[in-house]
Amino acid sequence: MPASDADMAGADAVHIDIRRGNPTAEELAAVIAVVTEAYEREAADAVVEDAPLRSAWEVSARGLRAPLRRDVAWGRFAG
C-alpha cells in the first residue's frame, strides 16, 4: 500500500512549540530556514575522513635507510 503525502510529511515533521508571542507564518518559516541551514552545515562538518593522509615526509623518507640490526654490536660496546 503506497504511503500518502500526509504520511510522508509526518515521518520527517518536526514539532515546534511556541511558548510566547504570536509569530506569523513568515517568521516561523524564517526561523525554520535558519535552524535547518545551521543543522545541515553542522552535519556536513561532522564527517570524518576515511583514512588519515600520509604526509610528504612519510612518503619520501620511507626508503632512506635500512632498519637497524639489533643482533650486531655497535662499536666496542656489546652491552
Image: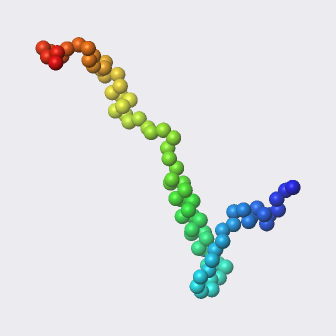
Asked where in the image residue 61 lies, by quadrant, the reply is top left
Q: Residue furthest front?
A: 79
Query: Image point 36% across, 31% down: which residue?
Result: 58
> Could you tell me how many numbered marks the image carries?
0
Query: Image point 44% across, 38% down: which residue?
Result: 53
For the N terminus, give its image quadrant.
Answer: bottom right
Given residues 25 and 8, the one toward you in this image is: 8
Residue 47 vertical placement versus 21 (above, below): above
Render colour scheme: rainbow
Residue 7: percent from the left, percent from the top?
78, 63
Given residues 70 and 18, the one toward you in this image is: 70
Residue 26 vertical placement versus 77 (above, below): below
Given residues 65 and 76, the one toward you in this image is: 76
Residue 76: percent from the left, percent from the top?
12, 14
Residue 49 vertical placement versus 34 (above, below): above
Query: Image point 52% across, 59% down: which residue?
Result: 42
Residue 49: percent from the left, percent from the top?
49, 44
Residue 43: percent from the left, percent from the top?
55, 56
For the C terminus, give its image quadrant.
Answer: top left
Query: Image point 65% across, 82% down: which residue?
Result: 24
Asked where in the image residue 72 lies, by quadrant, the reply is top left
Q: Residue furthest left?
A: 76
Asked where in the image residue 64 lies, by quadrant, the reply is top left
Residue 72 vertical placement versus 62 (above, below): above
Given residues 58 and 67, the one toward you in this image is: 67
Q: Report the side of 30 relative to 70 (left or right).
A: right
Q: Report the side of 27 relative to 46 (left or right).
A: right
